[in-house]
Image: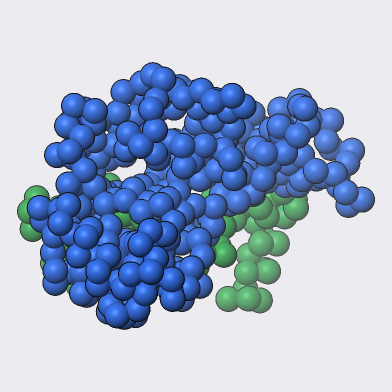
Amino acid sequence: MNIVISNTSEKPIYQQLFEQISAQIIKGEIEKGYILPPIRQAAKELRISIITVKKAWEELERCGLIYTITGKGCFVADLSSDDILQKRNEMILKQMTTDTSYYKSFGLTIEEIYELMKTVY
Amino acid sequence: MLAIDVNNLNKKYKNFHLKDVCFQLEKGYIMGFIGTNGAGKTTTLKSILNMIHIDGGEINILGKNFIKHEMELKQEIGYAFGGIDYYTRNKIRQVTNVVKRFYKNWDEEAYFNYLKKFNLDENKKIVELSAGMRVNYNLALALSHGAKLLILDEPTSGLDPVARDNLLDIFQELVEEGEISILFSTHITSDLEKCADYITYINNGQIIKSSEKEEFINTYRLLNGGESQLHEVKDHLISYKINSFGFTGLIHTKDFDPSSNIKSTLPNLEEIMIYFSKKEEQHV
């Protein structure tokens, strides 16, 4: 599991954690059954507060990407390829919704967005 | 369980009033205690430890009333107020021999580990130590009797950046098992941005806010706009500064309309402190 935390980013740290870990789970870089480090250990190693890590882990659990067994730890969930696809799309759509409202504020049509997107993709 | 539970603490001096101070620290976490010089940080910490006589309020430590169980609780508390400043003509070894007798659970191994970590030589006299080394020595004493709660007044001031970083590492190692809690005051807020779980902010003897760190920061927004936009938000701003490019000001998030054109960002702890202090100047 790789995590890079930026302190200069406007994004809250727990969200950075959540996004990076969920992306790695969805891309299959972290395998099912992988045990996430204990919250307090992760906080110490990443030099961030315990509550920040706790929030990120809770968010991952809420999204069904990990599950907790009390006393044992947090495990990466066993997701079918359908689940993964669905979760991936959910996340992409969420980002697209934010981006779209930005494009709309400039009055772009979907065709214009599409053309522009092609030039950068 | 609560490591610290302060309720309606009051202390009146001629020119200063600690007013209805309340805050709680959950066991196993780090709380940063911030405020400008003279805001009441040290007075609050000393009140918690019964080192000054309070006028009113109740303090519970590790679930027990502090006044009733003072001796017993002091065994479980490590505290350091600045650097060591007594027996200055004696060697570290001699001072330690005096201090360790007070503690039932003195841990010689931990003590020597900290001496090593802090690069302290037992044969040096206190008077020969630099300001930073005196702070570190005091911390070594505070950390070496198996304390469950650490109360530290500005432990990082006087330390160089490397030493401060090492100290924050030690703090996070200490709370890792979830048994030890730390309350420390500081005005070097960058020390807290990362490792603190909770922030308590005192200003002019009153607690402005005590909460989980991200929630604390999220309560406020720093606004940045042209001078013509100032009137839109002026009445709600905690305080503001104007220059030839426009204004910057601090506002409660709840008072700010996010659809407004004024640019808003999350403030850091330092900015929150600065604008709150400015508020007072404006009212005087």
* Residue closer to the observer: B237 or B77: B77
B239 horizontally vs B196: left or right:
right
- Viewed as shown, does residue B229 lie left or right of B63? right
Viewer-proximal residue among B54 and B273: B54
The chain in blue: B
Find residue B240 and report its horizontal and vertical position in percent.
Answer: 77, 39
| Residue A14 x/y as whole percent | 40, 55
In the displayed structure image, the side of residue B150 where residue B76 appears, left or right: left
Give the colour of chain A: green
Image quadrant in which you'd find residue B200: top left
Percent across and percent down for residue B196 are: 40, 53
Instruction: Report the residue at 17% width, 47% height from top.
Output: B75
Vertical side of B75 occupied by A1: above or below: below
- Quarter of the image with the N terminus of chain A is bottom left
Q: Residue furthest top?
A: B56
Image quadrant in which you'd find residue B220: top right
Q: Is residue B138 visible?
A: yes
x and y percent of residue B52 in the render? 39, 33
Residue drawn at the location 13% of the way across and 60% of the way down:
B106
Q: Is residue B50 above or below residue A29?
A: above
Name the residue located 72 percent from the left edge and 47 percent from the top edge.
B263
The image quadrant that residue A121 belongs to is bottom right
Residue at 46 percent across and 61 percent down: it is B156
Which residue is farthest left? A71
